Amino acid sequence: MFDDVNDLYQQVILDHCRKPRNFHELPAATCSAQGHNPLCGDNLKLFLTLEGEVIKDASFVGSGCCISKASASLLTDNIKGKTKAEAEKTFERVREMVTTGTVNGDVGKLAVFAGVHKYPARVKCAILSWHALMGALKGEAAPVTTESEQN
Ligand code: ZN
């Protein structure tokens, strides 16, 4: 599925898929959210430790395909130390990137998912953890599902 995507990007995704970072529960979490992508069967739970407006720590558990795990792994690395507003901005950038392939602003390593827009069935896998993040930040009690989203 990645035949025309940059090899380096593919390697980063495979590495995070096989050895996901921050892959554990967070006992001190102040909020969490469950994300579910019924199209693929991805299920993950995201944990955040908020201190005021700042995301001090982030982690996740769950199971899913390589893209969803790599996405959650890179997400947790990316948002640590960010404010809620910065995390929301990153979410908007990632969403635009995985749906259109356009990278707006600095997304760091998350740029490895830019090629996902060529595989519409995989977009929800890549964005799932980000929807869970938004759910956690908004304090939504109900599980977040990609089915309510058009992308
Ligand atoms: Zn998936």
Image: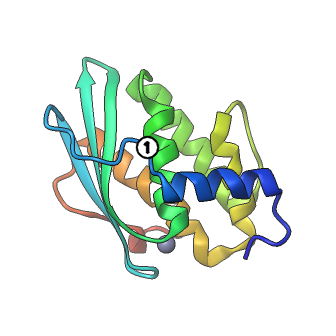
Residue at 60%, 78% in the rendered image: 121
* Residue at the extreme bottom of the image, as rendered: 39
Classify mark 1: residues with Cα within 10 Å, few (<14), some (14-19) or many (20+): some
- The quarter of the picture where residue 108 lies is top right
Q: Is residue 29 above or below residue 15?
A: above
**Towards the viewer: 86 or 65:** 65
Secondary structure beneath dot 1 equals loop
Instruction: Determine if residue 135 is in view.
Output: yes
| Left or right: residue 97 compared with residue 144 | right
| Left or right: residue 93 compared with residue 81 | right
Residue at 56%, 44% in the rendered image: 92
Q: Position of residue 96 (x, y in %)?
A: 65, 51
Residue bearing mark 1: 21
Instruction: Determine if residue 114 is in view.
Output: no
* Residue at the extreme top of the image, as rendered: 52
Amino acid type of the residue tagged 1 in the rendering: Arg
Residue at 86%, 68% in the rendered image: 4
- The quarter of the picture where residue 83 lies is top left
Q: Position of residue 73 (x, y in %)?
A: 46, 47
- The quarter of the picture where residue 148 lies is bottom left
